[in-house]
Image: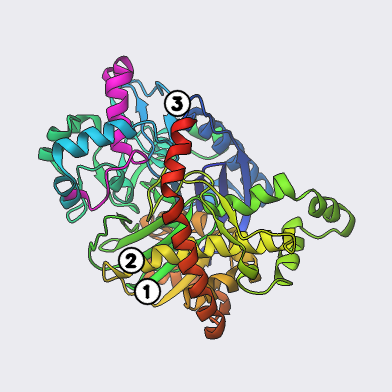
């Protein structure tokens, strides 16, 4: 089974056997464009080029006959707005999830329709990072592109189109459009009319594991595949990662580090919260109450900008610079002796929804070191996770356990910090390829490799580590968490003033 992940910084392709073992994988990077303040774009054509390179390399490394591939699943980042004409041409770069160019449009629409009118249908706030405001932005500021657009696609939908020639919309990505009824999983024609976006601009909705087409001859030639391989609709990266981590029961919660980090709480009902994100799971009849943060990339930023010593030691010692940073942070007491980091390095998503928010180190003095700052960075990301979990409790979400995924889960220290901050048990599956595995499971279930998702998870996901919270340390972190919340509250107006100056 082949899983393809369209991330923010790179495309990942991974080939799995039916027991979830990675046969081979490849990653190909691409860029993000920032043409103006608030703009963050990517070129879908560059995604496709990366997919072709990654898939070819994965098949070559695995020494697998591509005719053995039972199915292909594609997942991707949320809230794209890819304008595709009727001939299949991409008409412009797409705004991605970090893009806030439509902030003014959001204010106008919210004043005209009211928060409740929109929220009652979609269960999500009307924020500029979502897909709907971006389509309205095209409508107003690039009318030629808007009127030439046959369908607006999500990133995984575009790759599925390039593989199969079929234009689709999977149900888990529907939440990015505010006229998507979160209860029924269908488009709401009345609200789409009120928003001024005709439904014919959107594809038909499909279940994530539904086979929507087969690899075409042209795609096979470009990717090194064989024509005729089944391709499923695919889904949201966070939802596929949630499946790949083994979260298929209500109360189970996936947490992930990364530039687009956060958590996804599995629910058997569409219980929304105005400060969180609600989507369908890629597993039928389940929903995910999500918290999305941007702080997961903070440690990578710290290494790039302030980690020259660790990078030099990596070459000398043959140990990852991240492991060296972990070792430094482990020598500092929980709470970093009062150093607190606000991890708002690209504004912040839930639950504060503040594009002007900035990263802040608080509590520095001459007695503090870089090690304090490293540990505070790890703790700040954990506080952001905890902030989302506490907010989710207001919606009645019952979080029984956290299941970690992503590269951050490889850090035992970071995972333990998250357990201590949240007071929750955290389990770590055996593979850090949960997202591509989730996409592959969709393909395996849709093509008949597995009878259902429960069998798929039982065969492919195994827990290798369990981190229980230290309740004494948790009590200490709770006090620092209150300071963390107050820091943002006190700085919120300063962030806005600084943003206006810039």
Q: Is residue 314 visible to us here?
A: yes
Crowding at dot 1, Cα within 10 Å, few <14 / some 14-19 / many 20+, comes out as many
- Which secondary structure dominates the residues rendered in magenta? helix
Crowding at dot 3, Cα within 10 Å, few <14 / some 14-19 / many 20+, comes out as some
The front one of 455 and 200 is: 200
Tell me which residue sits at (23%, 63%) in the image.
Answer: 271
* 134 in magenta: yes
Question: Quick one: SS at disc 2?
Answer: helix
Q: Which mark is residue 392?
A: 2
State the image coordinates of residue 444 (x, y, percent, origin top left): 43, 58
Q: Residue under label 1, please give it.
A: 399
Q: Residue under label 3, please give it.
A: 93
CB under 8 Å between callouts 2 and 1?
yes
Question: Quick one: SS at disc 1?
Answer: loop
Count of marks placed on residues: 3
Q: CA distance from mark 3 to mark 2?
A: 34 Å
Q: CA distance from mark 1 to mark 3?
A: 38 Å
Instruction: State the extent of the magenta-drawn residues as a range.
Output: 121-148
Crowding at dot 2, Cα within 10 Å, few <14 / some 14-19 / many 20+, comes out as many
- The furthest residue to the left: 190
CB under 8 Å between callouts 3 and 2?
no
* 25 in magenta: no
Compare marks 1 and 3 and give the one earlier in the sequence: 3
Q: Is residue 420 above or below residue 405?
A: below
């Amino acid at each position: 089974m082949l899983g393809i992940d369209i991330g923010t910084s790179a495309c990942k392709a991974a080939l799995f056997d039916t027991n979830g073992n990675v046969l081979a994988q490849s990653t190909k990077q691409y860029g993000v464009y920032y043409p103006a303040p608030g703009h963050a774009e990517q070129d879908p054509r560059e995604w496709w080029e990366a997919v072709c390179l990654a898939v070819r390399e994965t098949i070559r490394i695995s020494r697998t006959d591509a005719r053995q591939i039972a199915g292909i699943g594609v997942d991707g980042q949320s809230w794209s707005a890819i304008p595709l004409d009727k001939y299949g041409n991409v008409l412009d770069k797409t705004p991605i999830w970090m893009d806030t160019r439509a902030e003014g449009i959001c204010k106008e629409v919210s004043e005209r329709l009211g928060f409740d009118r929109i929220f009652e249908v979609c269960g999500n706030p009307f924020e500029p990072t979502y897909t709907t405001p971006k389509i309205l932005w095209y409508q107003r500021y690039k009318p030629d592109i808007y009127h030439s657009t046959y369908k607006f696609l999500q990133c995984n939908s575009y790759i599925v189109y390039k593989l199969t020639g079929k234009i689709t919309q999977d149900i888990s990505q529907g939440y990015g459009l505010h006229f998507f009824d979160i209860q029924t999983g269908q488009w709401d024609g009345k609200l789409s009319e009120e928003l001024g976006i005709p439904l014919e601009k959107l594809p038909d909705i499909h279940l994530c594991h539904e086979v929507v087409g087969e690899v075409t001859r042209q795609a096979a030639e470009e990717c090194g595949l064989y024509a005729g391989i089944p391709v499923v609709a695919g889904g949201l990266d966070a939802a596929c990662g949630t499946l790949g981590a083994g979260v298929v029961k209500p109360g189970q919660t996936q947490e992930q580090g990364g530039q687009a980090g956060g958590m996804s709480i599995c629910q058997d009902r569409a219980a929304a919260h105005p400060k969180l994100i609600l989507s369908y799971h890629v597993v039928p009849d389940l929903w995910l109450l999500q918290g999305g943060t941007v702080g997961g990339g903070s440690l990578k930023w710290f290494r790039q900008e302030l980690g020259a010593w660790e990078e030099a030691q990596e070459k000398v010692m043959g140990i990852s610079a991240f492991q060296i940073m972990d070792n430094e942070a482990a020598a500092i007491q929980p709470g970093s002796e009062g150093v607190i980091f606000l991890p708002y390095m690209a504004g912040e998503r839930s639950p504060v929804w503040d594009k002007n928010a900035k990263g802040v180190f608080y509590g520095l003095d001459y007695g503090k070191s870089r090690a304090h700052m490293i540990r505070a960075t790890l703790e700040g990301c954990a506080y952001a996770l905890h902030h989302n979990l506490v907010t989710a409790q207001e919606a009645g979400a019952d979080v029984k356990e956290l299941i970690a995924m992503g590269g951050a889960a490889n850090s035992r220290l970071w995972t333990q910090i998250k357990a201590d901050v949240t007071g929750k048990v955290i389990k770590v599956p055996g593979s850090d390829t949960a997202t591509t595995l989730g996409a592959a499971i969709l393909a395996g279930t849709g093509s008949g490799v597995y009878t259902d998702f429960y069998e798929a998870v039982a065969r492919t996901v195994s827990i290798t580590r369990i981190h229980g919270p230290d309740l004494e340390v948790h009590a200490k972190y709770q006090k620092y968490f209150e300071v963390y919340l107050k820091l943002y509250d006190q700085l919120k107006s300063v962030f806005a003033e600084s943003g206006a100056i810039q």
